[in-house]
Image (cartoon, grey):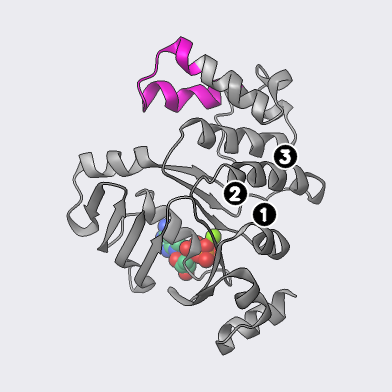
Amino acid sequence: MISLSGLSKSFGANAVLKDINLDIQEGERVVIIGPSGTGKSTLLRCLNYLDKPDAGVIRIGDLTVDAAHASRADILALRRRTSFVFQNYALFANKTARENITEALVTVQGKTRAEANARADAILSETGLSDKANAYPAALSGGQQQRVGIGRAMALDTELMLFDEPTSALDPEWVGEVLDLMRRVAEKRQTMLIVTHEMQFAREIADRVLFMEGGRIVEQGPPTALFDAPQDARTKAFLRRVA
Ligand code: ADP
Ligand code: MG
């Protein structure tokens, strides 16, 4: 179980997250939607301390971190329990697809080179990229690069996978293969927290959809409820705009 309570974050005078409270069950797929600039990325980034929350408590499994007083060990422990898929892939340009996947397995998880290579090869096969193992990112399509980005996160086998608009930087022709891979991850009951503008995908994959605006969770519910019968005027207005 993952639990956020009272999570808050400001950048200077700009209060970006305002008292976020959220429980996520093991195996649950939660999708966050909402207008841009509303704190969606900051929420994901606070969960693994890419951004430092100002206040709140983050619980992931047996780990509890009081954000205001997190030690270096707490931060490392949070990062070990989460993996992150970035909008812009964030691959190492000077490493091959296989090396991008093995890097954290060796440096963060302490696997031997042989163990890491075996794990990477299994993931490359699962993501349909075995023939690209030795290719550098520049030689891969956007869709292939993001599949490496997802494979890198899958390889870590963490309690929570975070996806921040994983298809937003892609040419339309590559979106489908990335969503297909995310569907396969979801089928394994991997706990996922996904920010996306792909509403049809959210409807299919999500156990629960959150609508965020102005640094708060305004409304949440199963996709059919949130998309077909939204209650809050802000949710209704947003869904009308993106329809
Ligand atoms: P979203 O992902 O919903 O589009 P973000 O979480 O990226 O929103 O941003 C929310 C707000 O926080 C925006 O006003 C943005 O300008 C601000 N913000 C995000 N990151 C930083 C940062 N590193 N420094 C200052 N302001 C930031
Ligand atoms: Mg964002």
Q: Which numbered dot is residue 143?
A: 3
Relative side of 50 to 123, left or right: left
Quadrant in the picture for residue 67 = bottom left
| Mark closer to the chain start, 2 or 3 | 2
Main SS, magenta residues: helix
- Nearer to me, 75 or 211: 211
**SS of the residue under disc 1:** loop
Characterize the local packing of mark 1: few (<14), some (14-19) or many (20 or more) Cα atoms within 10 angstroms: some
Query: Above or below — where is 217 with respect to 85?
Result: below
- Nearer to me, 81 or 37: 81
Residue 142 in percent (x, y) is at: 72, 39
Residue furthest bottom as drawn: 233
Quadrant where the C terminus sits is bottom right
Amino acid type assigned to the residue bearing label 3 in the image: Gly
Quadrant in the picture for residue 227 = bottom right
| Mark closer to the chain start, 3 or 1 | 3
Q: CA distance from mark 2 to mark 3?
A: 11 Å
**SS of the residue under disc 3:** helix
- Report the magenta residues as a range: 98-116
Query: Above or below — where is 232 with respect to 186?
Result: below
| Label 2 with label 1: CB-CB less than 8 Å | yes
Q: Which numbered dot is residue 87?
A: 2
Q: Which residue is mark 1?
A: 168
User: Is residue 104 a member of the stretch shown in magenta?
Assistant: yes
Query: Above or below — where is 178 with respect to 156?
Result: below
Q: CA distance from mark 3 to mark 1?
A: 11 Å
Whether the residue carrying mark 2 lies under 8 Å from ligand 2 is answered with: yes
Residue at (73, 19) in percent of width and height: 131
Residue at (72, 48) in percent of width and height: 170
User: Is residue 142 a member of the stretch shown in magenta?
Assistant: no
Residue at (33, 68) in percent of width and height: 12
Amino acid type assigned to the residue bearing label 2 in the image: Gln
